Image: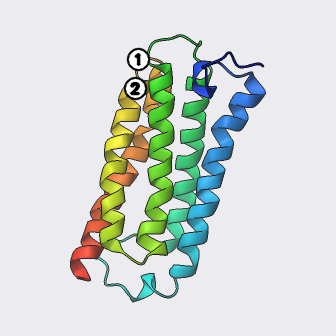
Amino acid sequence: MTALPGTTLFDRRPPIWAAVAIAILPVVAVSIAGSAATVPQIPSWYAGLVKPPFNPPNWIFGPVWTALYALMAFAVFRILRVPVGTPGRRRALVLYHLQLLLNFGWSFAFFGANSPVGGLLVIVPLLIAIVATITAFRPLDRLASGLLWPYLAWVGFATLLNGSIWWLNR
């Protein structure tokens, strides 16, 4: 596939194999990088924090995030298969990748920097970006939009948890 002058990845519909790779690889990269920042901090820094009574057990985070990342990858795959030139497609893909970048940043702000306030400074824009992505996906593919609602719910819960941890440990 040859790009026309002045076009980007977001301006053309990739072949199915490329759409699968574009959907999966960024999610896997964010997952691996986030885990690298998070896992070493769990038995040390995170274990020493005062947490609210609704804090889930540590083992639940891995399966939940695996499922959410799979839903995200499938949702963006569906958007990548929307015909090029469809109004809103490019914006939807940019918003999706922006929220993925913020998702990546949260692990480094909260765990990597040992900063609940830093986590809040990233997770609030992340919530807004997820809502914007869901809104942008909806006219293009209702299923793709719907696949992101569990992610929004979990990040909403994570925001409450992050804020509570900040409050209890200030």
State the image coordinates of residue 153 (x, y, percent, origin top left).
36, 48
Left or right for 61, reference 167: right
Q: How many numbered marks are there?
A: 2
The circle on residue 65 is none
Q: Secondary structure at mark 1?
A: loop
Is the residue under label 1 in contact with that under label 2 (CB below 8 Å)?
yes
Query: Disc 1 designates what residue?
Result: 139
**Circle 2: is it few (<14), some (14-19), or many (20+) Cα within 10 Å?**
many
Foreground pick, 49 / 63: 49
Q: Is residue 111 left or right of residue 6?
A: left
Whether residue 65 is situated above or below residue 131 in the rendered picture = below
Q: Position of residue 132 (x, y in %)?
A: 35, 34
Tell me the number on the disc at residue 136.
2
Give residue 24's quadrant in the image: top right
List x then y, in percent, for residue 97.
51, 40
The answer to which quarter of the image holds residue 13 is top right
Q: Amino acid at mark 2?
A: Ala
102 vs 92: above or below: below
Q: Amino acid at mark 1?
A: Pro
